[in-house]
Amino acid sequence: DVKVTQSSRYLVKRTGEKVFLECVQDMDHENMFWYRQDPGLGLRLIYFSYDVKMKEKGDIPEGYSVSREKKERFSLILESASTNQTSMYLCASSLTSGSPHEQFFGPGTRLTVL
Amino acid sequence: AQRVTQPEKLLSVFKGAPVELKCNYSYSGSPELFWYVQYSRQRLQLLLRHISRESIKGFTADLNKGETSFHLKKPFAQEEDSAMYYCALHTQGGSEKLVFGKGTKLTVNP
């Protein structure tokens, strides 16, 4: 069973703080993704990574950065948190081969920026 | 650009009634379509994919390339089907990205 875990279920931060969201997967997946999930807007891709130290911007990368130093871990960084980054953040991972293109999701981190 | 449209944000049916969640996509190549589901307080998970041609929890979805649609259907809805449903598209070209629709919240009333 694929396990994708996220470091926190709930997080409250203040405007201007630097925020780290961590995601770990235990199935040796090459690809990892960060999404934000907002009512009425669905899932929007922030960044994804297809290999260690490799990353690509998604649809809404502004205000975010990522880090992938190890294959199993993908971090999302909010350099200076703002109230409009209050959201549910979902991490996902997938294989490049095998079960084609299915993404496995973590439980989500609900971030509130005050 | 690739796009997935789910025209209904909310859908409400009674238990035992048929349900259809609509999904249309725009992509000129050969698509791979998925339905993902998120039950209350659970993680998002794959429900079914078009290449498998299987029925999961009584749900089926047929890819109609002529109408560029991949509607999700179930003949008799159950209360436990209440959830958020997302349609997703994978396109050819090497990237593992999926394009998600905005989702439809299904409520099955007793």
Image: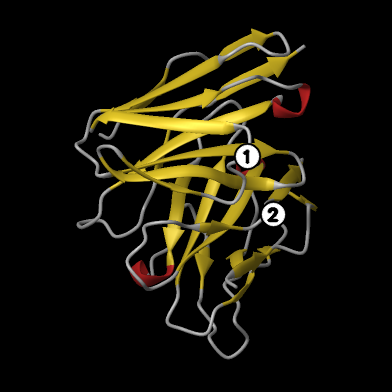
Dividing the picture into quadrants, the one containing residue A26 is top left
Helix, strand or loop for disc 2? loop
The 10 Å Cα crowd at callout 1, few under 14, some 14 to 19, many 20 or more, is: few
The amino acid sitting under disc 2 is: Gly
In this figure, which residue is indicated by the disc labeled 2? B16
| Amino acid bearing label 1 | Glu
What residue sits 59% from the left and 81% below the top?
A: B68
Give the camera-side residue of A86 and B21.
A86
Q: Mark 2 lies on which chain?
A: B
Q: Is residue B108 visible?
A: yes
Residue at the bottom extreme of this rendering: B66
Residue sitting at x 32%, y 66%: B94
The residue singled out by tag 1 in the image is A62
Nearer the observer, A77 or B38 = A77
Across and down, in percent, residue A11 comes to 60, 11
Say if mark 1 contacts mark 2, CB within 8 Å. Answer: no
Q: Mark 1 lies on which chain?
A: A
| Residue depicted at x 48% and y 20% | A21
Position of the N terminus of chain B by quadrant: bottom right
Q: Quadrant of residue A66?
A: top left
